[in-house]
Image (cartoon, rainbow, N blue to C red):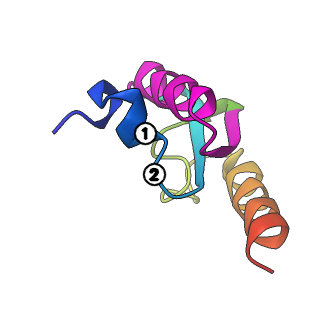
Amino acid sequence: MCPNLMADDLAAKMPPTVIYTTEFDSFRPDAQQAADLYGKNGTLLDYGTLPGTFEAGAREFENFKRCNDWYHAIGAVAHRYLI
């Protein structure tokens, strides 16, 4: 399944979406492509790239110094859009 290939009319029907990635994430280009697609169709709420972090940085917190940045960003998104 490749959601980034969906047509604009379908992307416009997506729920409001938040996309975050990390600087050293192998899927960062896909996240940017999704953000472009959703932004063009009015369904992107927020997009961000966390600098200096790896894709596993959020779940291997004992090994990465920047994992608190990830949790802070997710908390800020939750506070802004859910609370």
Q: Which residue lies under the disc numbered 2?
A: 14
Q: Which residue lies under the disc numbered 1?
A: 11
Q: Give the tally of numbered discs.
A: 2
In front: 13, or 3? 13
Magenta-tinted stretch:
26-49
Q: Identify which amino acid the numbered label 2 is placed on.
A: Met
Using the image, determine if residue 24 lies above or below residue 54: above
The percent coordinates of residue 52 (x first, y second) are: 69, 28
Callouts 2 and 1 close, C-beta under 8 Å: yes
Q: In this image, 32 relative to 73: left or right?
A: left
Q: Identify which amino acid the numbered label 1 is placed on.
A: Ala
Instruction: Say which quadrant the C terminus sits in.
Output: bottom right
> How packed is label 1: few (under 14 Cα within 10 Å), some, or many (20 or more)?
many
Compute the Cα span from label 2 to label 1.
Answer: 5 Å
The percent coordinates of residue 2 (x first, y second) are: 22, 33
Residue 47 covered by magenta stretch = yes
**Dot 1: element:** helix
In front: 54, or 41? 41
In front: 44, or 24? 44
Quarter where residue 48 is shown = top right
Q: In this image, 20 relative to 1: left or right?
A: right
Residue 82 - label: none
**Dot 2: element:** loop
In front: 1, or 55? 1
- Residue under the point 45% across and 46% down: 56
- Residue under the point 70% across and 60% down: 74
Using the image, determine if residue 75 lies above or below residue 18: below
Q: In this image, 47 relative to 73: left or right?
A: left
